[in-house]
Image (cartoon, coloured by chain):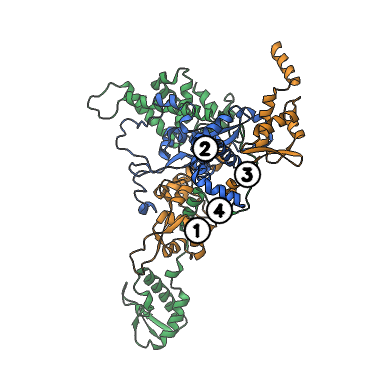
Chain colours: A blue, B green, C orange
């Protein structure tokens, strides 16, 4: 590249560019990609000393009410078309296979109860999780593994992903529809069945106390 | 009334009117399609009470469910085991709710059990509603869209390798379960074949002028490991029989389980 | 239908939406469509009577000097990041390739058994591990060298990295499910080869609601 750019690079080591310029830079970065980009990833690309959160909030304001909006999902930021204009984009619509009832319910249970174990999903639905359900949700990138539960058997847990939030236009999983009411009503409490003291998830004891005895 | 529920299970059973249809219907083995397990069935039954789920009569519900199962039995509909487990549990719950409380009884009271069942129904219902609300939201790629063109500005190319957690887990599972699906065959490295034994014996019998025990003829490397020893013994014995048949060897055993002896003929 | 609704329907057939709305609509279309769009294609998507050239010129003006510009390429219109910000986009051209089977398997074994030696990986895989496979995983930053094993020859061990955990969305490698859990969750593809018996018996009841069940 030319010398002038090099000069400005050196300068930028000391002075952050003006706010309007930071805003432009972030705008360009977010426009160029499809996936949400985290503030940290943005900061890594910008010259030293930029005020990413502030610039993002200006940018968000600038796009408010426009045909394209700046939205937040999880840790990431992305430009998305305004939802009310979806009808114009029918040609762009990706036909996704419809999730079955079991798939949708399992997804909802994970989203509202996360982190949650397979045993808990089964307890809530009253049936065993059929083969392929979790598989499919993992493949869609909507759920992932959380930390193992610190309870006997240390069962694996599932949580929803940033992609899930992005897909459903949620900023955080606290924005799930009705979650506050459900929590207030105690629906999301982990209430063990009466008399089940000391009873554990059915994975219990079988497995996973330690990486070493996890196999076979 | 229970007929209504049964009819909901399988459309083939609509016409109970004529005898023939009934016989056909009764010989059918119908699984409870359309219901996702006993809890789902209970939730469906509870709607027939036409009250707020919080006010549902659990006793009434238990009776409805038991009627349902009775009716299924009468029609010889085969219910999956979990439906029967639920029926047994509800029968137990019903007795707890109806009988006076035994002060010596340690377990949870009928009311506690009923309250928990009510909670489970409410929770399942709530999750169903939430799932529907979730799906009703604007969705990426359907209602709102990401940038269609992503930009390639620089010529600098980096290659990244993708692999997902699912790839990883499946790969691991594939390795760890590979052995599970091997068709039944012996591990070759622990098998001493009869051909090998025959080859060895042919070389050795020339010197077998005196009676000697079969076990002496086992190859050195096959004497310690019990598995290998067993295999070598069997094949050496078979090879010896073969040589007897050919008239080149004699064998004898003084009594049952005594050592087998052989010598050159 | 009431008269008033009919009236408004008829009106909308003739009255184009306000200019600001037309601008929004074009903005969304240009953002979401994959290739540059001609004025005619835009007009075809918009309600009847829109002033596409006028709306485009407003939109162009709005994006002037911003991080993203509205530019004409050929006959079509498209958004492009501002040319002076190209340097920010350098990391964008990423080619993604699928990791080879040997790579995935080796990585999986290291993740499940770490710290583990090359000899152990070979024993588990049942085939030798090529130098190239380990090199590539090292280069990707997904594995690194662990402590030497205190055993004859003091062999080098391999462990997974923080980058690995980030990439696969794991908190710790201990959160990886064991074989029993994989099987129970239906993630384990253990369809036996035709004719094989036993082993799968435990899934028997669920088999019917296989994969198909996920979709309607």
Q: Position of residue B54 (x, y in %)?
A: 41, 20
Q: Are marks 3 and 1 in contact (CB under 8 Å)?
A: no
- Chain of residue at mark 4: B
Residue denoted by label 2: A164
What residue sits right under mark 3 in the picture?
A: C84
In the rendered structure, the answer to whether residue B206 lies left or right of residue C79 reads: left
Q: Residue at x 55, y 48 (%)?
A: A9
Look at 45% across and 65% down and name the residue there: B186
Q: Which residue is mark 1?
A: C139
Q: Is residue A38 left or right of residue A189?
A: right
Q: Is residue B177 visible?
A: no
Name the mark nearer the viewer: 3 or 1: 3
Marks 2 and 1, Cα distance to the nearest angstrom?
30 Å
Tell us which disc is closer to us: 2 or 1: 1
Q: Which mark is residue B160?
A: 4
What's the chain of the residue with tag 2? A
Q: Residues within 10 Å of mark 4 (few under 14, many from 20)?
A: few
């Amino acid at each position: 590249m030319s010398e002038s750019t090099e000069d400005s690079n050196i300068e930028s080591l000391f002075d952050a560019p003006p706010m309007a310029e930071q805003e432009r830079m972030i705008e360009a970065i977010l426009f160029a990609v499809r996936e949400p980009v985290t503030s940290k990833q943005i900061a890594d690309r910008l010259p030293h000393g930029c005020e990413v959160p502030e610039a993002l909030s200006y940018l968000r304001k600038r796009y408010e009410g426009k045909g394209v909006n700046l939205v937040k999902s999880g840790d990431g930021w992305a430009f998305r078309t305004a939802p009310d204009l979806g009808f114009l984009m029918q040609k762009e619509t990706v036909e996704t296979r419809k999730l079955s009832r079991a798939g949708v319910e399992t997804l909802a249970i994970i989203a509202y109860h996360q982190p949650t174990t397979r045993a808990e999903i089964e307890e809530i639905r009253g049936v065993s999780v059929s083969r392929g359900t979790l598989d499919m949700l993992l493949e869609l990138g909507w759920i992932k593994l959380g930390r193992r539960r610190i309870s006997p058997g240390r069962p694996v847990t599932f949580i929803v992903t940033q992609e899930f939030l992005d897909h459903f236009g949620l900023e955080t999983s606290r924005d799930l529809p009705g979650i506050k009411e459900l929590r207030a009503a105690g629906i999301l409490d982990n209430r063990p069945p009466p008399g089940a003291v000391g009873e554990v998830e059915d994975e219990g004891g079988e497995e996973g106390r330690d990486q070493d005895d996890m196999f076979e | 009334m229970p007929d209504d529920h049964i009819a909901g299970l399988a459309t083939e059973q609509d016409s109970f009117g004529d005898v023939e249809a009934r016989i056909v219907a009764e010989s059918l083995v119908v699984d409870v399609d359309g219901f996702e397990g006993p809890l789902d069935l209970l939730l469906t039954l509870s709607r027939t009470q036409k009250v707020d789920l919080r006010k549902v009569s659990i006793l009434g519900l238990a009776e409805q469910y038991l009627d349902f199962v009775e009716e299924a039995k009468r029609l010889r509909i085969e219910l999956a085991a979990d439906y029967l487990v639920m029926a047994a549990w509800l029968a137990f719950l019903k007795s707890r709710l109806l009988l006076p409380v035994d002060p010596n009884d340690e377990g949870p009271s009928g009311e506690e059990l009923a309250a928990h069942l009510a909670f489970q129904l409410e929770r399942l219902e709530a999750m169903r509603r939430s799932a529907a609300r979730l799906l009703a939201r604007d969705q990426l790629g359907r209602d709102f869209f990401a940038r269609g063109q992503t930009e390639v500005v620089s010529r600098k190319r980096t290659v990244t390798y993708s692999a997902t957690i699912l790839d990883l887990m499946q790969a691991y599972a594939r390795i760890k379960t590979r052995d599970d699906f091997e068709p039944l065959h012996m591990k070759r490295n622990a098998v001493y074949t009869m051909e090998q034994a025959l080859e060895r014996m042919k070389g050795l019998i020339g010197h077998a002028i005196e009676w000697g025990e079969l076990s002496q003829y086992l190859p050195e490397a096959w004497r310690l490991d019990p598995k290998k020893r067993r295999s070598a013994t069997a094949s050496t014995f078979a090879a010896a029989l073969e040589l007897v048949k050919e008239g080149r060897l004699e064998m004898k055993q003084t009594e049952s389980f005594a050592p087998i002896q052989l010598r050159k003929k």
